[in-house]
Amino acid sequence: MFPLFFEGDIVVIKPYRLNSPKIGDVIVFERNSRLVMHRLIMASRSVEHQSLVYTCKGDNCLVVDAPIGRTQVLGKAILIQRQQTLIKLDSIWGRLTQKLLAYFSLIELSSKRRTTLLNRAKRLTCSLLKVLESSQLVRN
């Protein structure tokens, strides 16, 4: 999930109770007896099952995951601990960054200029993370 998560980061996951996942959330779900942590980029109604299904994609992946149902979703990432720094994904800056990444993922999938847009999205995200890390919303 680079550029948001780095190797060695500790991620706090909050289970969903009554509320549903939102576009941009980094969700944890189970697939083939393994845990996967990817960004939710689209929610839609399944015609055959008459229920809501979610489409996810890793930030650094070029293809989307197969749709998943609500029962497969275990929770969402709310906090990243990177060495001595805490990054709150449920803060205003964190939610904005997540929404932008979901938006850029959708643009990337629908555009012929995938590489250019992906590079712009990554640069913007890294800039937002720098602002986030230097803001008062992050504690050392």
Image (cartoon, rainbow, N blue to C red):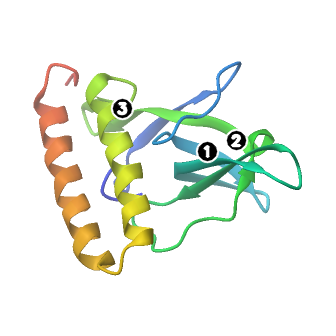
Give yes or no for contact between labels 1 and 2 (Cβ–Cβ under 8 Å): yes
Disc on the earlier residue, 1 or 2: 1
* Rendering coords of residue 6 (x, y %): 34, 54
* Rendering coords of residue 37 (x, y %): 55, 51
Q: Which residue is mark 1?
A: 28
Please, what secondary structure does the residue beneath circle 2 have? strand
- Give the amino acid type for the residue marked by disc 1 in the picture: Val
Disc on the earlier residue, 3 or 2: 2
Q: Which mark is residue 73?
A: 2
Q: Which mark is residue 95?
A: 3
Q: Is residue 108 left or right of residue 131?
A: right
- Give the amino acid type for the residue marked by disc 2 in the picture: Val
Q: Residues within 10 Å of mark 3 (few under 14, many from 20)?
A: some
- Give the amino acid type for the residue marked by disc 3 in the picture: Arg
* Rendering coords of residue 18 (x, y %): 70, 18
Q: Is residue 76 above or below residue 5?
A: above
